[in-house]
Amino acid sequence: MEEMLFYDRMQFAFTITFHYLFPQLTMGLSLIIVYFKWKFLKTDDIKYNKATHFWMRIFALNFAMGVVTGIPMEFQFGTNWAKFSELTGGIIGQTLAMEGMFSFFLESSFLGMFLFGEKIIGHKWHFVTGLLIFLGSWASGFLIIATHSWMQNPVGYEILANGKFVLTHFAALFTNPWLWPSYLHNQAASLVTSSFVVAGIGALYILSKRNEDYGKLFLKTGVIFGLISSLIVAVPTGDLLAKNVVKYQPVTFASMEGIFHTEQKGAEIVLIGQPDVKDKKLDNKIAVPNVLSFLTYGNWDTTVKGLDQYDENTYPTNISGLYYAYHIMVGLGTLFIGLMSLAVLQLFRKKLFETKWILWAIFFMMPFPYIANTTGWYTSELGRQPWLVYNLLRTSEGISPTVSSGNTLFTLLGFVGLYLLLGLLFLLLVGKVIKNGPETVKK
């Protein structure tokens, strides 16, 4: 059973990690594309319209990859996680069905019109279709996170005698206190990824001295969107989400922060340290006294409970992984704010385009928002373990008893090989679009 559970978790972790590389770009990029189209309508500057179509090509490639990699992930609910689907389908089926029927079809239906229908429908309706794509992608994210939020903080449910969960209050799914901070945090993080990609491609064009006008446009747009979204990720959304963890999953919070022993009269915030779970301590730590108490409770001297206050059976399954994922996310988020602040400062000083070290930094930082988003999701998922539905349904109780570990391992290896080929193809296609540049867009 342990081997089966391990491979089931590994397969889902791999497929969802790879899949989310693509929606995190499309959700944020859809807003930037709408902005470019709006600027074209406002200024009648053809440069903005070509920028719109350039980024829509990249959006379309990401969208296609998101669809292809999302389908196998969905099938796992009926294969590897059949028991989970059977027990909770009456609740999570609501939001997942809405995501597929409404949001996905809204987004995909208007994508073709936006890509090929501009001459037929005109620029104003072209803008409207772009806006609908944006709304569809963000609604899709909302419904997925509504599902995830219910698993983190189950509300509006009843458990029948046969163990199945049924929904008693439909509105509770969307008024879940876990939902809105999670959703806004996720969407802002998606915009961080998109902003760094847009700014990074702009920096590349400036450094290589080609498509420089577009490079300056992309860089300016990217750093402004990037600074705003990076700040929103931290405050208020990240702060609100952390307070939710303190309130609803306190043992998870203690693990995230590496608090093995309750800290009286103020808890320190650990900047660097290595958790030693066996001896229940942090090695080689660098910490700032009392700051965690202030950030969490608004008081420098408030006691923060450690893992010693909870039953070990309730501890997260992988405390070290949770701790590192959380600190990588927070560390990178802080770095993003610093870099984008410097870039915006140089932009207002009219020196950004000549400050090569910032251009190189932005270019090389493009992959790191993907890492931050991934570790952010790992923080959330590792923090919930060993539960599928927090405090109600254990992960070990949700797997299918009829799918062997050998079958799961075989398909996992198949996914790894297939996704490697798809990833390489995707990079080649995106690289070709970037190499050709916005000027090749015939609009």
Image (cartoon, helix red, strand yellow):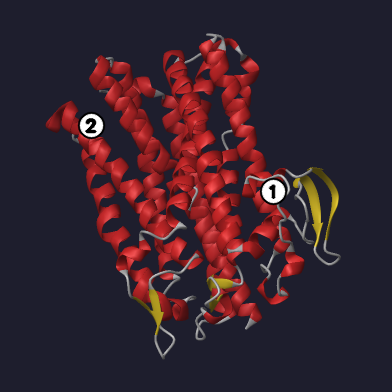
| Residue 72 in view here | no
Q: In the rendered image, which quarter is residue 98 located in?
A: bottom left
Q: How many marks?
A: 2
Residue ID at (36%, 35%): 31
Residue 298 point in image, percent of width and height: 63, 45
Considering the image in quadrants, where does the C terminus appear?
Answer: top left
Q: Is residue 411 above or below residue 306?
A: below
Looking at the rendering, which quadrant does residue 8 occupy? bottom right
For badge 2, the amino acid type reads Phe
Q: Residue at x 44, y 79 (%)?
A: 82
Locate residue 264, reporting x and y percent.
Answer: 78, 56
Residue occupying the point 74% across, 56% down: 258
**Mark 2 lies on residue:** 127
Q: Residue under label 1, please give it.
A: 293
Mark 2 surroundings within 10 Å by alpha-carbon count, few (fewer than 14), some (14 through 19), many (20 or more): many
In which quarter of the view is residue 43 placed? top left
Extreme bottom residue here? 161
